[in-house]
Image (tube, helix red, strand yellow):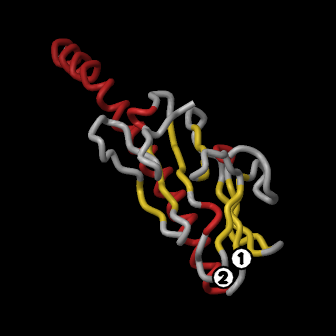
Amino acid sequence: MLIALVIVAILLTAASPPLAAWLQDNRLVAQINRLNGTLQLARTEAIKRGATVTVCSSSNGASCGGLWKDGWIILAGATLIQTYGALSADTTLHYTLAAGTPASTLLFDSRGFSTDYAGTWSLCDSRGSAHARGLVMTGSGRVVKARDVTMNGIPEDGQGNDLSCP
């Protein structure tokens, strides 16, 4: 029985690092999918309501302000449509417009366009850019996942630059 426990302990020790990395990767995928769903919902609501819809960072879940990693909300005028809570503690989320300016708010017009808000979302954890996830939003309001086109192991933003993590 003791030998079996020793073997199990050795196997679990050997499997720990890959398992931890797999869990971190899955957490990032789930978080970027949640953000993608947010943007799709906001765009759909703008078209459905025939009005501008805002997505903004929110540290209190009721009004705009704070960092994206603290959470975000969807607003149609003063009406709160949806609230999203904070990301996990070791995660950062940044939205940078195509011009390179950080942004804490984006708007979808009544046609679902986001003309002045084309940019890139970067989601990172403590492992850095090599494990980053991203979303690229076009002026037409279309959102696509950032891809590693250059095959260097790091996804690129809308301008072809590697995603960067602070």
Q: Quadrant of the C terminus?
A: top right
Q: Is residue 140 shown above or below 110?
A: above
Residue under the image location 54 percent in, 50 percent down? 121
Amino acid type at circle 2 is Ser
Using the image as rendered, state which of residue 62 and residue 19 is in the foreground: 62
Can residue 102 be seen from the camera position used here? Answer: yes
Q: Position of residue 25 (x, y in %)?
A: 38, 40
Q: Are marks 2 and 1 in contact (CB under 8 Å)?
A: yes
Q: Which residue is mark 2?
A: 110
SS state under label 1: loop
Residue under the image location 30 percent in, 35 percent down? 152
How many residues crowd mark 1 within 10 Å: few (<14), some (14–19), many (20+)? Answer: many
Can residue 95 be seen from the camera position used here? Answer: no
Q: Position of residue 48 (x, y in %)?
A: 62, 86
Q: Position of residue 10 (x, y in %)?
A: 23, 16
Mark 2 vs mark 1, CA separation in Å: 5 Å
Amino acid type at circle 1 is Thr
Q: Which residue is mark 1?
A: 52
